[in-house]
Image: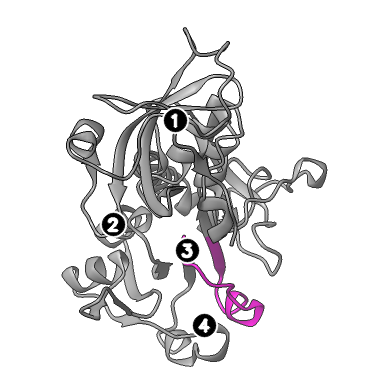
Amino acid sequence: MKIIFMGTPEFSCGILEALNEKYEVLGVVTQPDKVVGRKKVLSFSPVKKTAISLGLAVFQPTKIKDNYDDILALKADILVTAAYGQIVPEDFLNSFKFAINVHASLLPKHRGGAPIQRCLINGDKTTGVTIMQMVKRMDAGKIYASESIDILDSDNNTTLFKKLSIVGRDLLLRNIESIYNNKNIGSIQREEEVSYSYNIKRSEEQISFDKTSREVFNQIRGLAMEPGAYAIINGESLKIYQAKELYDGFTMNNSAPGTVLKAKKELIVKTKDSAVSILLIQPQGKKIMDIKSFLNGQKILSVGDVFKYSLD
């Protein structure tokens, strides 16, 4: 079995490693390098780093739809994608005996580019991975296999990515040969059950405390640790990576949502129905820190100050 693998983030790396250990991976396609930070350092995708460590050929087309002849020249017979990050053209897909995708949701729920973030933000109780046929329509192909896991309150975007990467790796390895040998022909998705999880917009990263404590908690963990939710107070933007819901003693508090109720040893903020305790925070230009370290000597906020929500 000769494979072309397409992927970009950390989620994809374990899947690539497992495929390479058992089969022949002829090449790896990933997103172009990026220049990041003030020092303009060139950054490789996690998949590129993994591919280099494995000695595999790497392809990084700016737009895969315009540049894939060199990839097809390798004459692989199966394409495997896992969080690649670009729409793959139909002509390219049709050049392989099979084109399959490791998608981090229980299809047909959460089609799209941000299924892990959205399932947390939405407050879903379960999620999973689906091995599916790649077709022209986004995440609309036949389902070959799926496996679910529970979402715990301790989960966030980062931990769930890691869990689902392992689930996806093992699920793919259990099914790839039966797919390749036509023993697993898949099943059609039920269109009436479809939902979409499009990529997170910048405007969705800002926290409005005029929501329930549960909704604020879910937004924060759904974006942690990348890109991170943020909130604005006294003209300062603070990234918030972890919070805890509070109910006892706060449900009857009549302060406006966003009001700082406590700022000594704890940072407690009023929500629509109760309050949340901020546990992990990052001021602008500084490192991530626990809340006690942040509150020790900070001059950004005080009790009675209010977090403002603005899209300006």
Q: Are marks 1 and 2 in contact (CB under 8 Å)?
A: no
Residue extending furthest top?
A: 248
Which is more toward the observer, 268 or 101? 268
Which comes sooner in the sequence, label 4 or label 2? 2
Q: Write down the quadrant of residue 112 in the picture.
A: bottom right
How is colour applied across the structure in the image? one colour
Where residue 180 appears, as percent x and y from the top left, is: 51, 59
Q: Quadrant of the N terminus?
A: bottom left
The residue that disc 2 covers is 22
Residue at figure coordinates x 26%, y 44% from the top left: 299
Instruction: Report the residue marked by disc 4.
Output: 64
Left or right: 281, with 290 as reference point: right
- Range shown magenta: 82-100
Q: Residue at x 55, y 48 (%)?
A: 115
Classify residue 161 as left or right of residue 143.
left
User: First in sequence: mark 4 or mark 3?
Assistant: 4
N-terminal label among 1 and 3: 3
Element under label 2?
A: helix
Which numbered dot is residue 304?
A: 1
3 or 2: tag closer to the N-terminus: 2
Disc 1 marks a residue whose amino acid type is Gly
The quarter in which the C terminus is drawn is bottom right
Closer mark to the observer between disc 1 and disc 3: 1
Q: In front: mark 4 or mark 3?
A: 4
Find the distance from the CA under tag 1 to the CA under tag 3.
50 Å
| Crowd around label 3: few <14 · some 14–19 · many ≥20 (10 Å) | many
